[in-house]
Image: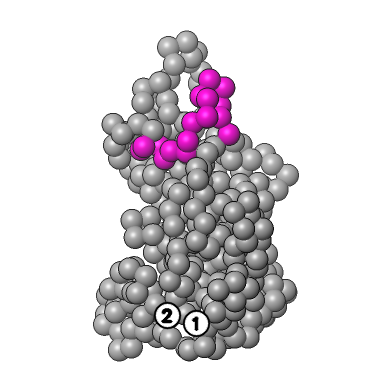
Amino acid sequence: MSDLETLASLLPTQRLSVMDLVEQAGIDVTPWHTTAEGRPVKNPKANPSYCYDWAFGSEKEGFLVCIWHGSLKLLDFPSGQAIVYNENFRDLALGLDRKAIDRTQPSEERNRARSQAHRARAFDRALQLSFRRAMPVRVIVLEGDRRQREELGKASSTVDARKLDRENWFMHAYDNDTGNVLLVRGVVLASVELPAAEGDGDAPLKTPDQANPELGRSKYVDQFSAPAPPTMREATVLIRDRSAAVREAVLIRAGGLCELCNEPGFVTAAGSIYLETHHVVPLAENGPDHPSNVVAICPKDHRRAHYAADREEIAIRLTAILDLRVG
């Protein structure tokens, strides 16, 4: 079968349930059977907490994403052509965030945009993590009335048919600066590497826990708990009281990865992983000292969150990320 014929064969013709396809992909669907409050659901396949999502799974199970057949392309590789998906869901989420906070728009459209931004961000995160962990991705291929980007928020797409692709897909690229992705069907990326730091050589990508297997959940530190270098001078500054328990919970939630750019924190001289905790709504503005208002981010992004020209957009992104992670 030619590559063009393979692409055509991926066009779904049956409207199979999302829940059945998620289960076929090896992802646990037990949560579909109950509401957020723990009450049984009469029809789990129609559970609105899950059936409208665009991405499913976890780092443990692997990820499954929903992709429109019309967005698939053929791309030339040294070994021949392959079917690829090239999109930017981070940018989509930001656009939807702007619609969600635009008070000139009808509340129905703002609420829809907020929900769609949540799904777009989950999709983006699934592909980010799959790229960084070199994990295969499963794909549900969709066909139906697909809304264009500019229509999202105002309306929802309608799926007429869907199918689970039998092949694994692999992330070949994730651009941290732009959010562009390249997902390729059936072609394994030989190696996933980070740009080498000085003295590191060509070090393959590793998660913080892979880089230092001795690190445990209690070995995450921030700017308040990291041991000061012996040469650091003391200074008296005003620092509002922050809960150590809240900071620890947020650092554990982040798992050593910046919650904004998803880059690993650096390893300190004491062997801990360093990120900085940041209140999205500042304590000085009566923001709560609670995990729902606190993120763990890398020092660069922390400075950006305070001083960058686009700090308001960064605050919107962080709020949406917290909405996704804390609920």
Write the residue at 26% across / 82% down: 40
Residue 216, x across and y down, in percent: 29, 37
- Quadrant of the drawing holding the C terminus: bottom left
Secondary-structure class at tag 2: helix
- Neighbor class of circle 1 (other Cα within 10 Å; few <14, some 14-19, many 20+) is many
- Quadrant of the drawing holding the N terminus: bottom right
Q: Which residues are magenta?
A: 195-210
Which mark identifies residue 178?
A: none
Residue 165, x across and y down, in percent: 46, 73
| Residue picked out by circle 1 | 162
Which numbered disc flags the more N-terminal residue, 2 or 1? 2
Residue 271 within the magenta-colored segment of the rendering:
no
- Neighbor class of circle 2 (other Cα within 10 Å; few <14, some 14-19, many 20+) is many
Secondary-structure class at tag 1: strand
| Quadrant of residue 59 within the rendered picture | bottom left
283 lies left or right of 271: right
| Quadrant of residue 31 within the rendered picture | bottom left
Write the residue at 63% across / 54% down: 77
Does the residue at mark 2 contact the one at mark 1 (Cβ under 8 Å)? yes
249 lies left or right of 144: left
Q: Amino acid at mark 1?
A: Arg
Main SS category, magenta section: loop
Which mark identifies residue 18?
A: 2
- Compared with residue 216, is residue 119 higher up or lower down, i.e. above or below? below
- Compared with residue 200, is residue 230 higher up or lower down, i.e. above or below? above
Q: Residue furthest top?
A: 231
- Compared with residue 118, is residue 60 higher up or lower down, i.e. above or below? above
Compute the Cα span from label 2 to label 1: 8 Å
